[in-house]
Image: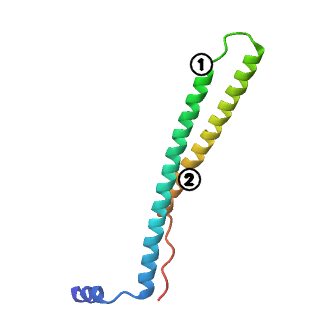
Amino acid sequence: MLDTMKNTARQPMENTTRLYLLDLVRQAQQATAAHAAAVRAAARAAKAADQARARVDEVARQRPTAQDPEQTSEFTDELGEALEDYADYLNRLQAAKRDARLRGLAPHAPAPTPPRR
């Protein structure tokens, strides 16, 4: 039995099998690179969402104390804009996290069937 194992190990690999394995390695490298890019995008989105939240807090702290209707209107507009930006950044963050999660699963997807001999 050991003799047959030694002989099989010495047999050259077929070109189709070699190309198939190289293709699997290439796909794995691409999936890893895509996942890393998605994680970086999620980190950027998280940072932007934090900055937008800080802006909302800053605008809210600067609430006008006087009862001047013009100041109140400007404050409301600015606060509304800051909240819209924050909501947009949160949506981007959720999408980036979802993308990173899905791309992280890509290398674990079933591999294509090997070529027939």
Disc on the earlier residue, 1 or 2: 1
Looking at the image, residue 39 lies above or below residue 111: above
Q: In this orientation, does residue 104 appear?
A: no
Which residue bears the numbered disc 1?
61
Residue in the picture at 73% in, 10% down: 67
Residue at 49% in and 57% down: 35
The answer to whether 74 is drawn above or below residue 25 in the figure is above
Q: Nearer the viewer, mark 1 or mark 2?
A: 1
Q: Which residue is at 50% across, 68% downward?
A: 110
In the image, residue 105 above or below residue 63:
below
Number of numbered discs on residues: 2
Q: Position of residue 14 (x, y in %)?
A: 40, 88
SS of the residue at dot 1? helix
- What's the amino acid at mark 2? Asp
| Left or right position of 13 against 116 | left
Question: Which of the two residues, 9 or 95, is positioned nearer the viewer here?
Answer: 95
Q: Residue 90: x and y, percent?
A: 60, 39
Q: Residue furthest left?
A: 2
Which residue matches tag 2?
A: 99
